[in-house]
Image (spheres, helix red, strand yellow):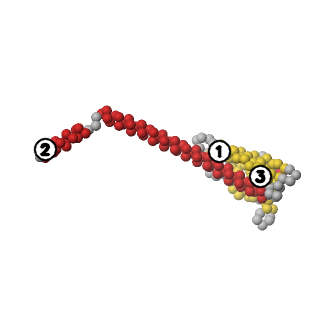
């Protein structure tokens, strides 16, 4: 009885085995599915990198523009003698009403802010390269203002994404 049972098991394994053609077909199907999955994964990673680059540039540009705009609006006036295309000097007051000088200046790859000659810090975030800045002053009979153009680049990205940011700001009380 045991011999017959054992022969049936061996015979069923021989009948249910895979032929060489079936294995090759299964491997080909598995290879195609693997290629599709890996390509999809690569596309997702590339999209994530592009989105991260765009977000980093947008966040940095917005933060820089907001800080410069806020300081310009709060300033008493623009120091024309000490302002150039890559330097902006503002005459302002602190919370106690004391006169202070606020200066934005491009120094190398940094956009530094100074208050009364003391370095407050760099306005750029990590992994952002500061290419250029331009401060263009304008004056009318009632208004003082600045047109600002900043060009930033993401240093981590392999896609070399540059972005320009524009703003026009008038001093508070000048409109």
Residue carrying label 1: 153
**In the rendering, at what x and y percent does residue 93 appear?**
79, 62
Give above or below for 77 relative to 164: below
The residues tagged by marks 3 and 1 sit, at their Cα atoms, a distance apart of: 23 Å
Q: Residues within 10 Å of mark 2 (few under 14, many from 20)?
A: few
Does 135 sit left or right of 154 as displayed? right
* Helix, strand or loop for disc 1: strand
Q: Identify the residue at horizontal 77%, vertical 55% (top origin).
A: 72
Q: Identify the residue at horizontal 36%, vertical 37% (top origin).
A: 27
Pointer 1 or 2: first along the chain? 2
Does 4 sit left or right of 83 as displayed? left
**In the rendering, at what x and y percent does residue 32 appear?**
42, 37
* Helix, strand or loop for disc 3: strand
Nearer the observer: mark 1 or 2; the answer is 2
Residue 59 in sight in this render: yes
Residue carrying label 2: 3
Residue 79 in sight in this render: no
Q: Quadrant of residue 21?
A: top left
Quadrant of the drawing holding the C terminus: bottom right
Pointer 3 or 1: first along the chain? 1
Pointer 3 or 2: first along the chain? 2
Residue carrying label 3: 169
Q: Identify the residue at horizontal 28%, vertical 37% (top origin).
A: 18
Q: Residues within 10 Å of mark 3 (few under 14, many from 20)?
A: some
Nearer the observer: mark 3 or 1; the answer is 3
The residues tagged by marks 1 and 2 sit, at their Cα atoms, a distance apart of: 79 Å
**In the rendering, at what x and y percent does residue 75 appear?**
79, 58
Viewer-proximal residue, 51 or 108? 51
């Amino acid at each position: 009885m045991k011999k017959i049972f054992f022969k049936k098991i061996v015979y069923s394994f021989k009948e249910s085995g895979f032929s060489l053609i079936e294995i090759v077909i299964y491997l080909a199907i598995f290879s195609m599915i693997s290629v599709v999955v890996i390509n999809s994964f690569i596309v997702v990673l590339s999209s994530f990198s592009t989105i991260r680059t765009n977000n980093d540039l947008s966040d940095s540009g917005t933060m820089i523009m907001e800080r410069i705009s806020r300081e310009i609006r709060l300033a008493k006036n623009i120091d024309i003698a000490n302002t150039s295309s890559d330097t902006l000097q503002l005459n302002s007051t602190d919370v106690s009403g004391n006169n202070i000088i606020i200066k934005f200046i491009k120094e190398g790859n940094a956009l530094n802010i100074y208050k009364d000659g003391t370095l407050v810090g760099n306005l750029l975030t990590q992994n952002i390269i500061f290419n250029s800045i331009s401060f263009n002053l304008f004056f009318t009979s009632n208004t003082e203002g600045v047109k600002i153009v900043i060009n930033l680049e993401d240093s981590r990205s392999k896609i070399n994404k540059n972005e320009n940011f524009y703003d026009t700001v008038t001093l508070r009380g000048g409109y």
